[in-house]
Amino acid sequence: MKDFDLSKTVIRGIRESDLDSIVGIEEKNLGLKRKGYWQRELKKNQEGRYLGSVVAELEGKVIGFILGDIGSREFGMPENMGWIHTVGVHPDYQHRGVARKLFEDYKEKFLKLDVDFVYTIVSLSDNMQLPFFEKIGFRQGNRIYLELDIRKEPPVGDKLTDFDYRRIM
């Protein structure tokens, strides 16, 4: 990919016609094709359930996207908090400032809505997203993310042993 002028990248609201581009970007990055998922997410966005998802467009081509919202859900969390659900950039434009530009647009929206803290969930082994979020200032918080695969047998007793952990994972 030849160099491009980031200043020519337009950040605009997401449209239904962006669906195939977003699905394609995610498929190139993650090997997943989740058209049904993105159809549902675009519907939520149209209903105003999100902050206002946006795409990065260059010469009429979608090269990136960001999806997030605001609200308070969990006990003990700030009343007015922001969430970044996902960020995606076409591989030809990664490491060129597109994701940062998308986030900066979102950050401005968050600030106008009096959001104090922005959260996201990233796998500790994600060597693409974790470095990006750290680079723009995110740090590990003081909460623990817990999960339960309800399709697997839960451990017996009050304490989870290493053996139980390996068995259910």
Image (spheres, rainbow, N blue to C red):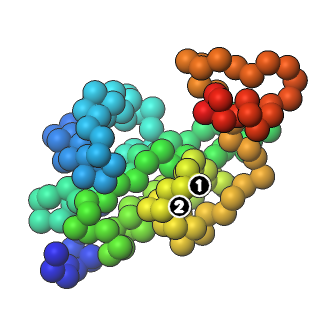
Residue 14 lies, in percent from the top left, at: 28, 45
Give the residue type that dot 1 points to.
Answer: Leu
Residue at the left extreme of this rendering? 60
Nearer-the-camera pick, 143 or 168: 168
The residue carrying pointer 2 sits among few (fewer than 14), some (14 to 19) or many (20 or more) residues within 10 Å by Cα, namely: some
At 21% from the left and 74% from the top, the residue drawn is 8
Quadrant position of the N terminus in the picture: bottom left
Check if mark 1's residue and mark 2's residue have beta carbons within 8 Å: yes
Quarter of the image where one finds residue 44:
top left
Q: SS for tag 2?
A: helix
Residue at the right extreme of this rendering? 158
Residue 46 lies, in percent from the top left, at: 33, 32
Question: Mark 1 — residue?
Answer: 124
Q: SS for tag 1?
A: loop
Question: Mark 2 — residue?
Answer: 130
Query: Is residue 114 visible to us here?
Result: no
Quadrant position of the C terminus in the picture: top right
Residue 19 lies, in percent from the top left, at: 21, 40
Using residue 33 as the reference point, say whether residue 163 is left or right of it.
Answer: right
Pick whichever of labels 1 and 2 is earlier in the sequence.
1
Using residue 75 as the reference point, say whether residue 98 is left or right of it.
Answer: left
At 25% from the left and 52% from the top, the residue drawn is 28
Quarter of the image where one finds residue 97:
bottom left
Using residue 14 as the reference point, say whether residue 159 is left or right of it.
Answer: right
At 26% from the left and 38% from the top, the residue drawn is 33
Give the residue type that dot 2 points to.
Answer: Leu
